[in-house]
Image (cartoon, rainbow, N blue to C red):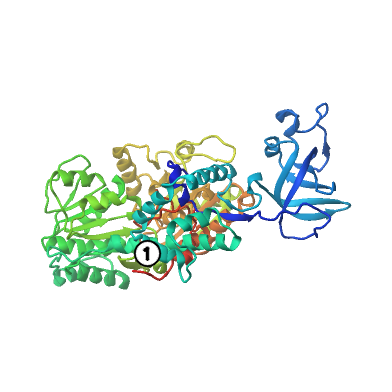
Amino acid sequence: MRIDDIELALLCVPSGYFDCRYALTRIGAAQEEDCRRLWALEKTGNVEAMDKQAKPLSCHPHANWYEAPWKRYWEHVRQLRIELRDADGRLAYLSQFGGWALREQPSTGPILILAALRQFGSRPFLTSSAPVPADAAGRVFPLYTQPDSQTQGDVIRKMVELALLSESSARRCIEALTRSTLMSEAQMLAELNGQDATFSSVEHFFRVMHAPDSPEMADRARTAARRLAIQGIIHSARVINARPPCAQAPISVDRTIVNSLIDAQPETLTTDQTDVIWALVTSLRSPSPTNALLSGDVGTGKTLAFGIPAVAAHLAGAKVAMIAPTEILANQLHASLVQRFPQARIERVQTGRKIQDLRAILVGTSGLTTQAQKQSFEPDLLIVDEQHKLDTGTRSILRGPGTHTIEASATPIPRSLASSLFAGMQVFNLYQAPVARDIETHLVEESQRAQTVRWLREVIAAGHRAAIIYPRVESQEKANETSGVKQSLQALQEHFPGRVAHLHGKLKSVDIDAELSHFRSGAKPLLVSTTIVETGIDVPDVRLMIIKEADRFGASALHQLRGRLARNGGHARFVMMCKDLDALAPETLERLRAVEGTSDGYALAEADMRARGFGDLSGSSQAGNISCAFRMLRLDFDELAQHPIQNN
């Protein structure tokens, strides 16, 4: 996390607190127990060091380990026993693993440490220890730690202490919260206090959060910060997403035309699709501009769900624009619309090129906004596909007071969460798939690739398509990385000469189009690619997908990749391959097992959000269209899901 302005450091929410008001100084008076207590002892300067077999190591000829050079003496050290003395002169030993941090500390002198007392033989040991800065003594000490970053926490703590000395810091932080939550200072204070009157002002809240008098006040402050963060996200979403009525908004969509567009499709639409289509049509006819989020699992037919209302609006005389995040997806969206709706005028607007037909359905990437501004084009209906990949500025440039907006998300958003993050928007969900698919998911190790290779040969021999996905373009030649697209392409061309296509983000657009064309036609039925195929690459007959180094992918990305399989229905296999499953971190293996165990995108999305929380909702990261001004604050799924709106 980066803070460029010290005065805004008060927005950092402590990760916890140490109660350092009372420290134990006598080991003899303490009982052996599991809980950690605060100890104020003295280091004698004596240290014992052991290797990984717990055998003693020597630092001879140096007087002690603090003076021994790092490389020669310390590389084999696995455990340290640091000798401590209490107020009565009794000795105890602090057990630590590793040694680098020890060399950064004084060899003798007072030490403040949080640890549990254990007795091993005749020697008392302090275990499960956590260091506490000496200046923490006598107060409730806030922690600003992040995973694997104690140094970062110390830096943030110093910045907070400086901010507390500034007369303008609290006021500037209040202004930042006001901009983020769109609440008045009185509304924010009401949220912070909840049912109590703990804080006399927002400034008082900041002081309590960073310099509490007791653990109880510290906990109240952290709880209050979470409450304000959640209500702020919901309140600001509702304010930002509100669309007042506009006389120019209603689009006279002909319901007969909508029915004819539905009937003209080669497949039978699902109940979900038809329900969404008619709900959108009703909304487009309203004087209040539509502000809708269309969320659906992979393969549920989002393009038709927003495409039919868009074409119907176009045929009713409305100006329509569609924005996709990449050239590939824009090309594919344009091709699909042209094929399905021959009665509509559809123009693919290339970046930097002039719009030829302002009354056509315009399809482009974010570059469309620049050209639209130059030609004073303001759509009556704006559709943003894969909305999570486009910044909010892209949408706001094209949207006028009467513009209807539909944002389609490739990531399934649980209904309970959408009501918070997208408060004020109409949220439509697609659950049903137009075609039945039977996709087997396998989690395997590299050592089991023989079976995967047999599946690959069978798929190619049967005239179907297969894809192998790598997390990178080129191998970085590290021991834990297998290969990349370029290395795999060379190897596979030896086994399937002239039949291997490849895709990655470094290719030119013309080359990407050519490779995709070869893959779609079956001229090159085997594709080696990066995650450029994650969303939207619609090649119907892919029957096998192999994900190399699957542990590098998130659950959502893996599910999106799996969604590229068997688009027209039928059987397919999805293989997640890792070098060594036993070597994976427990949370990584759990994530992969979750993907293996279910094909329900909504269930996976919820499980992933529960596991990850919502990260550091800093000023630069967003939840929906909304940012949170607090830093270092991890919100849980249940905190945001279905949270009631208060103090409107």
For residue 55, what is the image quadrant? Answer: top right
Residue at horizontal 43%, vertical 38%? 497
581 or 250, nearer to the observer: 250
Relative to residue 498, is residue 348 depicted above or below? below
Relative to residue 476, is residue 591 depicted above or below? below
Q: Quadrant of the C terminus?
A: bottom left
Q: Determine whether, in the image, residue 425 is placed left or right of residue 282.
A: right
Mark 1, residue position: 187
Could you tell me residue 422's position as x and y percent?
35, 63
Residue at horizontal 36%, vertical 66%? 435
Could you tell me residue 508's position as x and y percent?
32, 36
255 or 291, nearer to the observer: 291
Residue 69 in view: yes
Residue 600 in view: no
Residue at horizontal 47%, vertical 50%? 10
**How many numbered marks does the figure carry?**
1
Could you tell me residue 98's position as x and y percent?
71, 41
Q: Determine whether, in the image, residue 14 is placed left or right of residue 39.
A: left
Could you tell me residue 378's position as x and y percent?
15, 53
Q: Determine whether, in the image, residue 405 is placed left or right of residue 354.
A: right
Sort mark 1 into few (<14), some (14-19) or many (20+) by Cα contacts within 10 Å.
some
Amino acid type of the residue tagged 1 in the rendering: Gln
As helix, strand or loop, the secondary structure at mark 1 comes to helix
For residue 268, what is the image quadrant? Answer: bottom left
